[in-house]
Image (cartoon, helix red, strand yellow):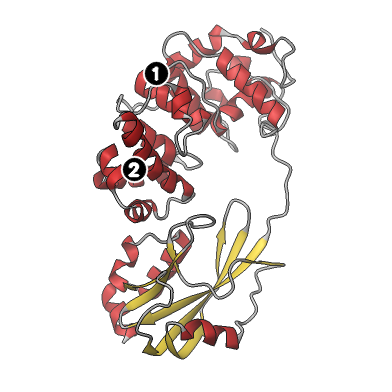
């Protein structure tokens, strides 16, 4: 059997063809793969699409609860398309990568407007919709309509890197292109659903990042990484860069059983969500040591909402994004007198009892829930 240790084959896609690979994978998936996930055993493109978007960069265990709650609130594509985006963001709150939720809403509206509420079966057309890339489009088309299309997510890259001994970083454009050629060449003529699910299942349950279960893997006899003792080395990791550190001072203004929240811009970090007003934005820093808030700036910021009576610095909260680490310094502010209105319409006073269901970033919601406690205790401390 031919084994390649270089990511590029000189003869192109034909050099990657291997019918036994798909046959072995399909046989394994049908006997040992996952078959009871709530989005499986259906041809409903809405259910498949929703699961694929939620599973982008998110583990199955984290998605299960959100998936069920989301469908309870939006049982059909049309109900999702017709809902206010704020309701969509609220249901997504805590799942992270909020651009997915905004694109989900836009995609639903596009499918209703352009396709009569029915997802197109062509992967190329699916890939043109908001939030659906080439790999996600292929998965949706394969599971909902049996389309013969190749996926290429993190699990597949890891499986390919180990099985075929690809000793190069999969994120490099040339390497990724070669992996796509291989993925297309390995597609089976029959059983695309089991094959596609098998790739996902292998990466998630056997060929895991840190502790691969090579003893149960159907690809062990052909796996270059196993044969050469390089399962820990492959796939080649992305060259490390120092994670930038940023600071933000957030105002926790509580008055009359309500907390003041601010609507964030539609783009950027936490785009479109409600959050706590910030004194200075996300500013670069050397470490997690946040300097005290400037008193003049604090008074000016709070003055818009009322007369400040007192403020208290709370414990720093650290949240890790994909590209940087954010250290949040919450300032608990009490008012002697509330201003009659928020200055620019971007702010809202929210009842403490509604915080748990609000469209808030995960660290902000956690901070408020821990601070406010149950509704009765919250009411007691706010008066």
- Image point (40%, 55%), residue name: 93
Tell me residue 12's x, y (percent): 68, 12
Helix, strand or loop status at disc 1: helix
- Image point (52%, 14%), residue name: 187
Separation (CA) of disc 1 from disc 2: 26 Å
To which quarter of the image does residue 339 belong?
bottom left
Q: Which mark is residue 379?
A: none
Residue 33 visible somewhere in the drawing: no
Q: Which mark is residue 31?
A: 1
- Image point (50%, 85%), residue name: 312
Number of numbered callouts drawn: 2
Q: Nearer the viewer, residue 278 or 285?
A: 278
The correct choice, above or below, for 246 with respect to 375 in the image is: above
| 213 on left or right of 228 | left
Tell me residue 39's x, y (percent): 33, 32
Q: Quadrant of the N terminus?
A: top right
- Image point (29%, 32%), residue name: 117
In the picture of the structure, the residue carrying the numbered disc 2 is 67
């Amino acid at each position: 059997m031919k084994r390649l240790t270089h990511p590029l084959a000189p003869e192109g896609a034909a050099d990657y063809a291997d019918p036994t690979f798909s046959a072995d994978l399909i046989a394994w998936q049908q006997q040992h793969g996952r078959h009871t996930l709530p989005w499986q055993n259906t041809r409903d493109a809405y259910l498949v699409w929703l699961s694929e978007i939620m599973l982008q960069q998110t583990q199955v265990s984290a998605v299960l609860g959100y998936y069920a709650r989301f469908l309870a609130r939006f049982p059909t594509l049309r109900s999702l398309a017709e809902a206010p985006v704020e309701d969509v963001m609220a249901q997504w709150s805590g799942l992270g990568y909020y651009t997915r939720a905004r694109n989900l809403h836009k995609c639903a509206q596009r499918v209703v407007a352009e396709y009569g509420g029915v997802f197109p079966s062509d992967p190329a057309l699916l890939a043109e919709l908001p939030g659906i890339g080439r790999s996600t489009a292929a998965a949706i088309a394969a599971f909902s309509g049996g389309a013969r299309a190749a996926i290429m997510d993190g699990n597949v890259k890891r499986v390919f890197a180990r099985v075929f001994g690809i000793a190069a970083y999969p994120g490099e454009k040339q390497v990724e292109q070669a992996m796509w050629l291989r993925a297309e060449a390995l597609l089976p003529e029959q059983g695309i659903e089991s094959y596609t699910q098998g790739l996902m299942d292998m990466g998630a349950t056997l060929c895991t990042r840190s502790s691969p279960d090579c003893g149960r893997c159907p690809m062990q006899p052909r796996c270059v990484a196993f044969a050469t003792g390089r399962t820990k080395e492959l796939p080649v990791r992305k060259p490390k860069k120092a994670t930038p550190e940023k600071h933000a001072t957030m105002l926790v203004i509580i008055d009359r059983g309500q907390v003041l929240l601010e609507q964030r811009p539609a783009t950027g970090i936490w785009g479109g969500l409600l959050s706590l007003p910030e004194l200075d934005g996300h500013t670069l820093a050397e470490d997690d040591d946040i300097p005290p808030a400037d008193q003049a700036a604090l008074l000016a910021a709070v003055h818009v909402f009322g007369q400040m009576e007192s403020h208290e610095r709370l414990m720093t909260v650290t949240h890790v994004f994909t590209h940087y680490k954010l250290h949040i310094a919450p300032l608990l502010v009490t008012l002697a007198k509330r201003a009659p209105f928020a200055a620019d319409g971007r702010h809202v006073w929210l009842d403490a009892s509604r915080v748990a269901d609000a469209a808030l970033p995960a660290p902000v919601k956690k901070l408020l829930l821990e601070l406010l406690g149950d509704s009765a205790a919250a009411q007691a401390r706010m008066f």
